[in-house]
Amino acid sequence: MSIRPRMAHWFELLTSREELSGALDCLAHTGSVQLQAYSRSESRLALPDLRRVLSEHETLARRYAHWWPPAHVTSPGQEYQLTEAPRAALERLRAWAAEAEPAVAELEGIAQSRTETAQLARLNALGGTTLPRLDSVAAAGPLLAGRVYRLEIGGPPLSLPPAVITQRLAGEDDLFLIAVGPQEDMVDLDQTLAARKARAITLPADLPADRGAVVAALEKRARELEERDRAARATLEALAERHRLADTLGEIALAAWVVAHVPELPVTEHFAWITGWCSDVDERRLRAALDARGAHYLLHFASTPAGESPPSILNNPRWARPFEVFTRLMGVPSDGEADPSVVVALLAPLMFGFMFGDVAQGLIIAAIGWMLRNRLPALRLLIPGGLVAVVFGLAFGSVFAREDLLPALWARPLEAPLLILGTALVFGVVVITLGLVLDAVQHVWRGDIRGWLASGAGMLVTYVGLVGATFDRRALWLVPAGITWGLVGAAALAPKDRAAALGQAAGDTLEHMLQLTVNTISFVRVGAFALAHAGLCTAVVGMATAAGAGYWPVLIIGNAAIVALEGLVVGIQTTRLILFEFFIRFLTARGRPFEPLSPPLGLSNPLPGSKP
């Protein structure tokens, strides 16, 4: 564990062009490599060719993806041709599409016919003896035309041509309209109903005249459609097997992985050069993985190329990793900056629990965080926050908003408001002092201790003097001493025009003193929210008592409201104090995150038809 981020190491890997895909897959499965191209070579991996393959694949997917099996994505072998294999796969996909088109069209037509057959059966059941002969409606002509429509229930009244004869049959969720009229009027009706998103139902030409026989005819038609459906699907399955469709889609998905995750790599006729960053401190793990694949390679950990900055790797214990979210709100610490995640893992729950001190409410908050920890990882922060709230609930003697069940192990907030506010202020002093100390540590890491001694040290002495004066007035002597220290240090470091440097330092000192004062006073809100929480709990208990027989419902609803409302408000205040009162003292977060290459079997955005 270290509060200083680890910097990734630059690596260079030379392998044969034939083994490039296997090497990339091997590196991705280590989870410790971020690729970055760094070469002036004019020969590059033909990613534009792969993008053209993917573009045509997407066009085919829009038509056929529904009929494709899940893609079979496998790790590429050592002889896998990264650029040639996707093109060959696209050729097989084209061949499959050409042969599959009749079967796909047949299945689409069958699906439409089955839907219409089911709707006709429903229409026949709804109409009973009042239903006109559907065979006569279908055979109307040549001057007349017959239609059957299905509409959604509701909507504005229909405007029908006067010469059209209609009959309506309404079900629970839909409406059937049977219409017969002159050809020209029926064309107008078609347009009107199309605007209402009505669907015309095609009437089979072989419907029997007898209404009783219609049911048997529709059942027979449904069986025939089912047989045709099975035959067409069997044809597609045979074509998928013959064209190795699952493997074909897998190879194209692998090409998509390369385009999405791999930069343009320099290649020659026989060799490929892979470069990037590794999170390991040495090359042993990469070598072991490549050796296990039987790869032929040359691997070298080199110094960082000129003009490049390595990604930062946060090195926190497991219990502190959820609190990295606070640091990442600012960015990523660069080399020479502190990663405050471990410190925040201690400070944030303390602030949250102090402002939310109640045993039962704290347990509820912790339980919510536990139940939602996998669905919303950020809510894992509620677990330690809720548990610390339990501790402060014991200290305040508050359980389920009531203060008559447990004795206060420390103090009841409403009975000792100055103690609560003063404790919050002392906590703020500790937090801000810690931020100033971390700033000093960062200067040491960057080899700039002289710069800190000339300015930052004087500000720390000034702040200690201001805070110490509240306990002993003799500490006020540290204030002018610290100010003088900072001014003299700034003038001493100035190469020329020391008077101007002294004036600027005086302005900066005044600004920083004001900032430190305001930042310190801001922590009083921690105590203020603790008092507000206690007051709200007292109000809820008072309302519950006044409710008489409704005591418990009011108490439960009131506690639920406190958990929902104050949980959000206290979380926001904790985040604000961490970011704007603590981080501002030392963290600039100008680094860049380490983003390891994910393996092809873990595609985050698989293509249509692919299966991660």
Image (cartoon, helix red, strand yellow):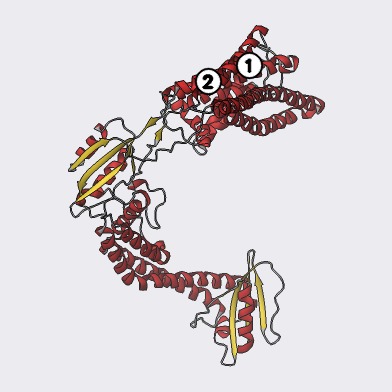
580 vs 160, nearest the viewer: 580
- Indicate whether 209 appears above or below 169: below
Looking at the image, which residue is at 52% across and 38% down? Answer: 376
Looking at the image, which residue is at 54% across and 23% down? Answer: 491
Kindly state the secondary structure of the residue where label 2 is placed.
helix
Is any part of residue 433 visible from this angle?
no
Percent position of residue 82, x then y: 26, 54
Is any part of residue 138 visible from this angle?
yes
User: Which label belongs to residue 489?
Assistant: 2
Q: Amino acid at mark 1?
A: Val
Quadrant of res 178? bottom right
- Indicate whether 355 appears above or below 30: above
Which is closer to the viewer, label 2 or label 1? 2
Q: Looking at the figure, which quarter contains the N terminus?
A: top left
Percent position of residue 606, x then y: 39, 52
Tell me the crowding category of disc 1: few under 14, some 14 to 19, or many 20 or more residues within 10 angstroms, Cα based: some
Disc 1: which residue: 426
